[in-house]
Image: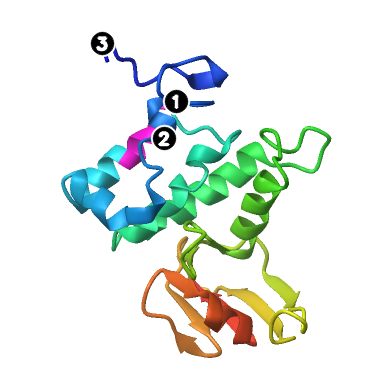
């Protein structure tokens, strides 16, 4: 299409090819094949640079669904997961508050609230059809979740954030029932059976 403006469509402006968003709002919305999308961008480094542009140049729109999972895509690139942790903290602080206008957009059956709740707990379902949750920094020092025994195990899960005098800004390890996970993702089946998840800094 010519002329093509990747920013056209921001602020719900009409644009050919997109609905309620711009090309920037949709370009990384490929949840069915995130590894393929990274490869298509030219690999980890180029993908990370391009994705970071979304945030650096103000293309991220927290008011609508197409790009709300973007902060978590850095978890798919080894060594870049700190960006997810940094961004989710910044976005929560900037766009969510305890006030009548405390959400950045239409909650759409709880979508914005759910993004905030998951992000505050320290994990997020980037791909609904995938049983893995991308990890981020939890907001609270301690969270207790009681699972419904009619649907899950009935477990009580305690999520804790632990810092020491030598703690840094970002997560050093995530332990599920004392065992360190080997990636930046928590598996749903492990999560619902766990008694304890500890984020160590």
Q: Which residues are magenta?
A: 51-58
Residue 182: percent from the left, percent from the top? 36, 79
Distance of mark 3 from mark 2, alpha carbons?
19 Å
**Dot 1 surroundings within 10 Å: few (below 14), some, or many (20 or more)?**
some
Task: Confirm whether residue 140 shows in the render.
Answer: yes
**Dot 3 surroundings within 10 Å: few (below 14), some, or many (20 or more)?**
few
* Viewer-closest of 26 and 87: 26
In this rendering, which labeled residue sits more in front, label 1 or label 2? 1
User: Where is mark 2, residue-wise?
Assistant: 26
Of helix, strand and loop, which one carries label 3?
Answer: loop
**Dot 2 surroundings within 10 Å: few (below 14), some, or many (20 or more)?**
some
Circle number at residue 18: 1
Residue 66: percent from the left, percent from the top? 50, 38
Q: Is residue 56 magenta?
A: yes
Which residue appears at 70% of the width and 72% of the height? 142
Q: Is residue 19 left or right of residue 121?
A: left
Residue 91: percent from the left, percent from the top? 57, 43
Distance of mark 1 from mark 2, alpha carbons?
8 Å
Which residue appears at 62% of the width and 81% of the height? 192
User: Where is mark 3, residue-wise?
Assistant: 2
Q: Residue furthest left?
A: 42
């Amino acid at each position: 299409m010519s002329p093509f403006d990747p920013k056209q469509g921001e602020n719900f402006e009409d644009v050919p090819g997109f609905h309620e968003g711009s090309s920037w709002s949709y370009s990384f919305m490929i949840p069915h094949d995130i590894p393929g999308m990274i490869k298509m961008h030219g690999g980890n480094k180029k993908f990370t640079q391009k994705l970071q542009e979304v945030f650096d140049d103000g293309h991220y729109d927290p008011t609508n669904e197409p790009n709300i999972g973007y902060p978590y895509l850095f978890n798919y690139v080894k060594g870049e997961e700190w960006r997810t942790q940094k961004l989710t903290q910044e976005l929560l602080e900037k766009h969510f508050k305890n006030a009548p206008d405390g959400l950045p957009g239409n909650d759409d059956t709880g979508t914005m609230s759910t993004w905030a709740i998951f992000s505050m707990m320290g994990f997020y379902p980037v791909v609904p059809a995938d049983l893995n949750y991308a990890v981020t920094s939890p907001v609270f020092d301690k969270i207790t979740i009681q699972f419904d025994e009619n649907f899950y195990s009935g477990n009580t899960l305690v999520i804790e954030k632990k810092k020491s005098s030598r703690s840094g800004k970002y997560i050093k390890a995530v332990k599920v029932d004392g065992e360190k996970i080997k990636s930046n993702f928590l598996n749903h089946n492990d999560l619902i059976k766990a008694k304890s998840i500890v984020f160590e800094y």
